[in-house]
Image (spheres, rainbow, N blue to C red):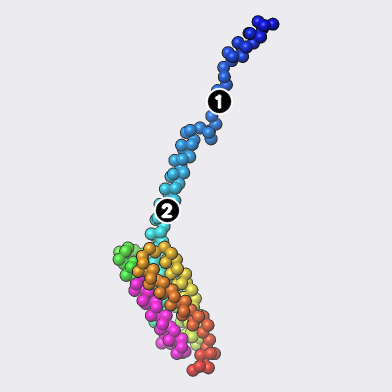
Amino acid sequence: MEGQEYLNQISATSKPMAVKKEGLFSSKLFIWIMIALAALVFIVIIGSIIGSGKGGEKDLGYALRLHLTNTGSAINTYQENIKSSELRSNSASLYSVLSNTNRELSNYLSAKYKIKDSDIDKKIVAEATTAFNTLSTELFQAKINGILDRVFAHKMAYEITLLLSEEKKLIEVSKNEALDEALTTSYKSLENLYPKFNDFSETKTIRKE
């Protein structure tokens, strides 16, 4: 009996130990691959953020410049046809704000990016052109139908809201102190002018005049 127990012990100790197999997710190779992929993704994200910041400022800047130019052109075209003296005065103030902002913005973009108008993203130009054509058409129709004052005030209020949004986005991405100051000044001026167009009433104007 003792001999049998001795043989059993020898048999048990002589059995080869089971080799522990490493799963795919626990292998060192997999861990290193995951670390490398994470690092790659991080680099791509950082590069994307840096790239989009520069491209964002340039694209937003040129889009805003086109918008300022086109809106100023529309004001200049229909200014003399506005009947309300109050609306003409507010329109002149708006034109002045747009012109000043356009000048400051154009100088900054020209100095930093040094590109010609023909080099501006075609999509930006197309969108600005479409918006300007729509505005011009609506103002022309209002003029020939004798309702220019009302439509002009409504359209300028709408353009101001768009410009405020564009200026805010550009301020957020720009790191230039002088440009930020110019845009902030413009933003505050546009905020003050907005209710003068949005709240315009031909009836109130006629009573005053």
Residue 61, percent across and down? Answer: 39, 66
* On screen, residue 111 above or below 92: above
Type of amino acid under label 2? Ser
**Given the image, on which type of amino acid does mark 1 rest?**
Lys
| Quadrant of the rendered image containing residue 163 | bottom left
Q: Provide the residue span drawn in magenta.
A: 77-105
Q: CA distance from mark 1 to mark 2?
A: 44 Å
User: Badge 1, how many Cα within 10 Å: few under 14, some, many 20+?
Assistant: few
Say above or below: 46 vs 157. above
Earlier in the chain: of badge 1 and badge 2, it is 1
On screen, residue 79 versus residue 4, left or right, reads: left
Which residue was labeled with disc 1?
20
Identity of the residue drawn at 32% across and 63% down: 113
**Which class describes the residues within 10 Å of circle 2: few (<14), some (14-19), or many (20+)?**
few
Q: Label 2, secondary structure: give it.
A: helix
Q: Is residue 190 left or right of residue 201?
A: left
Task: Tell me where residue 86 appears, x and y as whole percent.
Answer: 46, 88
Q: Is residue 117 visible?
A: no
Note whether 80 is above or below 175 in the view shown.
Answer: below
Residue 48 badge: 2
